[in-house]
């Protein structure tokens, strides 16, 4: 759809067997759990897209205006800080 000015590498971490869990810092939120399943990462951001998080040097969370894009699945963890951040950004 071309809504997010960024370049994404699909399935960057390999097949489902390459899925993993880690914790990392997300700008404006703090340290959060991250579950990656057949995850992409963002190779390059363009324009005013803001990088919010990186794991092992790879971009895994970005924000551009009202778009929040993540390479991980926050819905699979009990921590709701990503969801709270998203809702706060909507208001």
Image (spheres, grey):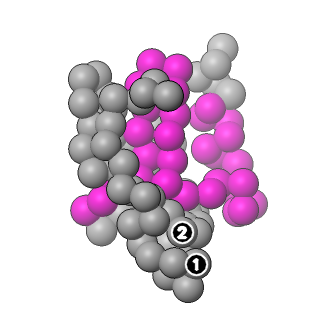
Residue 18 x %, y %? 50, 81
Q: Circle 1 sits in a helix, a strand or a loop, which is it?
A: helix
The residue sitting at 55% across, 58% down in the picture is 72
Q: Name the residue under label 2.
A: 38
Name the image quarter holding residue 54: bottom left
The residue sitting at 45% across, 65% down in the picture is 11
Local crowd at mark 1 within 10 Å, few (<14), some, or many (≥20)? few
Closer-to-camera residue (88/67): 67
User: Is residue 29 visible in this depiction of the protein?
Assistant: yes
Q: Mark 1 points at which residue?
A: 16
Q: In this view, does 6 lie to the left or right of 1?
A: left
Local crowd at mark 2 within 10 Å, few (<14), some, or many (≥20)? some
**Residues at marks 1 and 2, CA–CA distance in whole angstroms:** 5 Å
Give the extent of the magenta segment: 57-86
Q: Residue 8 carries which label?
A: none
CB under 8 Å between callouts 1 and 2? yes
Q: In this view, does 21 lie to the left or right of 12?
A: right
Q: Residue furthest front?
A: 1
The total number of labels drawn is 2
Residue 29 x %, y %? 50, 42
Q: Which residue lies furthest to the bottom in this view?
A: 17
């Amino acid at each position: 759809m071309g809504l997010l000015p960024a370049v994404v590498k699909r399935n960057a971490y390999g097949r489902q067997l390459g899925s993993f869990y880690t914790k990392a810092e997300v700008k404006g939120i703090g340290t959060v759990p991250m579950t990656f399943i057949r995850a992409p990462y963002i190779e390059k951001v363009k324009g005013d897209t803001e990088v919010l998080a990186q794991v092992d040097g790879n971009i895994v969370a970005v924000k551009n205006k009202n778009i929040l894009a993540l390479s991980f699945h926050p819905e699979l963890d009990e921590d709701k800080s990503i969801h709270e951040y998203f809702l706060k950004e909507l208001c």
